[in-house]
Image: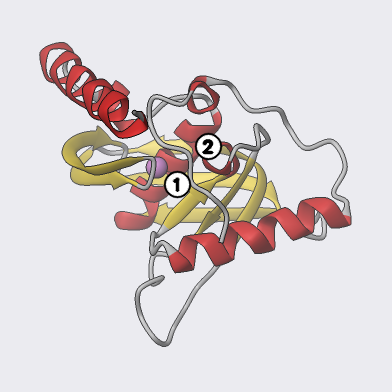
Amino acid sequence: MLNILKYPDPILKRKAEPVTQITDEVRRLIDDMADTMYEAPGVGLAAPQIGRSVRVIVIDVNSKEKENKELICLINPEIIEQSGETVWEEGCLSVPDYTADVKRAERVVVKGLDRNGKEEVIVGEGFLSIVFQHEIDHLNGVLFIDRLGLIKRDLIRRKLKKLARTESI
Ligand code: NI
């Protein structure tokens, strides 16, 4: 299991680079990310969260179930269509012990490459739509707490930074 970076690590704020060539190293990264996600456990993980500033995400909305696991791995994912509006209480492996309601699109269509470089188009509705948006945000250096109202955001940022300072002493 890889180490998951926590807010306010500066790598989480960086815009990740596209993958230009799908090598064995990229495939190994995907496998390690999937293992780390299941182990955490979480329903999604983006490469910047494990310190790699590249555009790779793994998702499994059934991650905590024993059966019916449904792993999605996408390289250079892009939202090509979005519609509707919904609010979910989100959390993040990089922002432990904190959740908040975030407004997102209800449905997204995401395009990306699979581990063999084949183009995939996936429709995400409901919770899967939320997770897609959350993970792709990570690739753009955006955390769910950045999407909260200003007052709430300032409050939680200060609280989290204080917490990070205490923990690193
Ligand atoms: Ni996250």
Residue 114 seen by the camera:
no
Q: Residue at x 57, y 36 (%)?
A: 48
Q: Nearer the viewer, residue 145 or 116?
A: 145
Which quadrant of the structure image shows residue 58? bottom right
Residue 163 position within the rendered picture, expressed as x and y whole percent measured from the top left:
23, 29
Where does label 2 land, which residue? 79
Residue contact between numbered discs 1 and 2, judged by CB atoms under 8 Å: yes
Q: Residue at x 31, y 22 (%)?
A: 146
Question: What's the amino acid at mark 2?
Answer: Ile
Where does label 1 land, which residue? 132
Which quadrant of the structure image shows residue 100? top left
Report crowding for label 1: few under 14, some 14 to 19, many 20 or more residues within 10 A (C-alpha).
many
Question: What's the amino acid at mark 1?
Answer: Phe
Dot 1 falls on a residue whose secondary structure is helix
Of marks 1 and 2, the one in the foreground: 1
Q: Counting residues from the N terminus, which is met first, the one under dot 1 or under dot 2?
A: 2
Residue 101 position within the rendered picture, expressed as x and y whole percent measured from the top left:
16, 38
Q: Any mark on residue 44, and which?
A: none
* Up/down of 69 relative to 72, above or below: below
Marks 1 and 2, how far apart at CA: 8 Å
Residue 27 position within the rendered picture, expressed as x and y whole percent measured from the top left:
77, 58
Q: Residue at x 24, y 27 (%)?
A: 160
Disc 1 Cβ-to-ligand 1 distance below 8 Å: no
Which quadrant of the structure image shows residue 90? top left
**On the picture, is 96 further left or further right than 132?**
left
**On the picture, is 168 further left or further right than 153?**
right
Q: Quadrant of ligand 1?
A: top left
